[in-house]
Image (cartoon, helix red, strand yellow):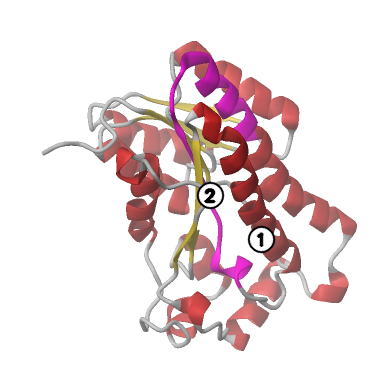
Amino acid sequence: MTLRLQNKTILITGASKGIGRELALGCAREGANIILNYHTDAAGAEAAANDIRSLGRRAITIRADISKFDQIKEMFAQARREFTQLDTLINNAALTGWSTLFETTEEKWDQVLDTNLKGPFFCSLEAARWMRKTGAQGSIVNVSTNCAALGVKNLVAYASSKAGLHGLTRQLANELAPLGIRVNTFAPGPISVERNLRDDPNYKNEWGNVVPLGRTGEASEMIGPAVFLASEESSYVTGQVLYADGGWSIQGKIPEANMGKAAEQNT
């Protein structure tokens, strides 16, 4: 069987848990070596790296807060000391930033926008510089959210940052196309990861009732979109946003009870 990412090197931000961890393992199973970024969960990142090594792939972990430009620079410097070439960057790390509209503070807004939009921009620049230097016609894959498609209560900073990420995707795709670097985004819908289940133990039912496919997604179901956009299977695809959300973005209902519970848990 041909592996779609054989001998590729992929850097994934926020790879210690949730969707990021699943993407790291999924890409490794397709033959890639993985650079796992994390911010606070060193144990989770190292556990994921060990799982990747057990597959016969190389894996390293690098701590960096991607809302900080100097830490992004240092992360890429460390990565270049370990690997000669970068083929794909997956901008996955993000903050939800729950807050009711009128209680959204400047601090909350800046924290979310710096992590979810500024971070992917400067990570993408560093990745593109590395790809340009080595001649790699690589891929940048942004992980967004269905909340960027339609307004969602109590997530003004999060939804705005991800809508900005869609604009950034188009801009970078246009600017980097002459280098052969593709830039795309996929936007997960409601996914049953630990964070969401912690906010609301009834998360699966609350969201499953408003998703056209009738259920929430699993983190492992996001591997397919990521691998497709990272691999040569999407060699003529750039500047696009793919919604992997069970059809939620074509309908747009929200479970009011869940949105209230999550905001209360995180405010």
x 44%, y 31%: residue: 138
Density class for disc 2 (Cα within 10 Å; few <14, some 14-19, many ≥20) is some
Q: Which residues are magenta?
A: 123-149
Residue 134 position (above or below residue 102): above
Mark 1 vs mark 2, CA separation in Å? 14 Å
Amino acid carrying mark 2 in the image: Gly
- Give percent across and percent down for residue 166: 61, 55
Ranked by sequence position, the earlier of labels 1 and 2 is 1
- Is disc 1 in contact with disc 2, using a CB cutoff of under 8 Å? no
Residue 239: give its label: 2
1 vs 2, front mark: 2
Task: State the quadrant of the C terminus.
Answer: bottom right
x 54%, y 30%: residue: 178
Residue 48 position (above or below residue 223): above
Residue 55 position (above or below residue 117): above
- Give percent across and percent down for residue 180: 47, 31
x 46%, y 41%: residue: 44
Write down the residue under mark 1.
Answer: 163
Task: State the quadrant of the N terminus.
Answer: top left
Q: Secondary structure at mark 2?
A: loop
- Give percent across and percent down for residue 221: 34, 60
Visible residue check, residue 101: yes
x 35%, y 45%: residue: 234
- Give percent across and percent down for residue 57: 28, 27
Q: How many marks?
A: 2
Visible residue check, residue 40: no
